[in-house]
Amino acid sequence: MHDDIERVLFSEAQILSGIDRVAAEVTEAYTGRGFTVVSVLKGSCVFASDLIRRIPIPLELAFVSASSYGDGTESGPVQLSFFPTGQEIEGRNLLLVDDILDTGRTLSQLFAELLKRGAAEVRSCVFLDKPTRRAVDFQADFRCFEVEDLFVVGYGLDYAGRYRNLPFVGALHRAAFARD
Ligand code: IMP
Ligand code: MG
């Protein structure tokens, strides 16, 4: 699996120091107010689990499921398939946590849907941001790293369902795409 990686963009140590910084920002923003971290499955589960363990104030955890990429590397229509219960949303301050902000379609749709379902407030926190790829107007409130327009895998991010378990973020060799 590691042989499929052409170049490492963020090492494990770099990732953890980026998360320390963002966790401190999130902690400051929510100190004294209750909030719920809403992890967008599947990609954000690795990031969310490292992030919440660095936030030393009370929080709750919920999950939503959204997928846009299918098996390829091009963005398709977003499917929202799993939602927290009404009780977990209504009147709550929600922090949507996702692996990567690309076209912005996933988070902007989730954002609107959670407000429609009665959330008091929705903010967002992303591990990676590819600002040059934006198709809809959306900015994250918190982000760890900006990346160039390049398909990346690892630390929760997948290609065709694989590579989520790499502890770093890297770019795939062309040959790894060509095999599928
Ligand atoms: P958006 O709706 O276009 O912003 O896409 C967000 C979703 O696309 C992310 O949650 C990822 O699942 C997927 N995605 C976007 N770029 C990449 C990438 O470089 N590698 C892996 N998945 C990606
Ligand atoms: Mg995803």
Image (spheres, grey):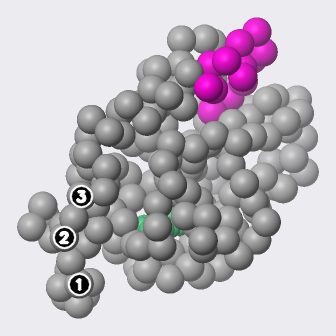
Q: Which residue is mark 2?
A: 6
Task: Give the magenta-colored segment's residue range.
Answer: 25-37
Total marks shown come to 3
- The residue located at (60%, 11%) in the rendering is 57
- Circle 3 residue: 8
| Marks 2,1: beta carbons within 8 A | yes
Task: Label 2, secondary structure: give it.
Answer: strand
Secondary-structure class at tag 1: helix
Decide whether residue 30 is among the magenta residues: yes
Q: Which residue is mark 1?
A: 174
Q: Amino acid at mark 1?
A: Arg
What's the residue type where badge 3 is placed? Val
Residue 23 versus residue 46: which sits nearer the camera? 23
How crowded is the residue under tag 2: few (<14 C-alpha within 10 Å), some, or many (20+)? some
**Mark 2 to mark 3: distance in Å?**
7 Å
Q: Is residue 163 above or below residue 75?
A: above
Beta carbon at label 3 within 8 Å of ligand 1: no
| Vertical arrangement, residue 103 with respect to residue 111, above or below | below
Q: Could you say where residue 54 lies in the image, as x and y percent from the top left?
A: 46, 20
Mark 2 and mark 1: span between their CA atoms?
A: 8 Å
Q: Is residue 126 above or below residue 163?
A: above
Left or right: residue 97 versus residue 35 is: left
Give the amino acid type for the residue marked by disc 2 in the picture: Glu
- Packing grade of label 3 (10 A; few <14, some 14-19, many >=20) is some
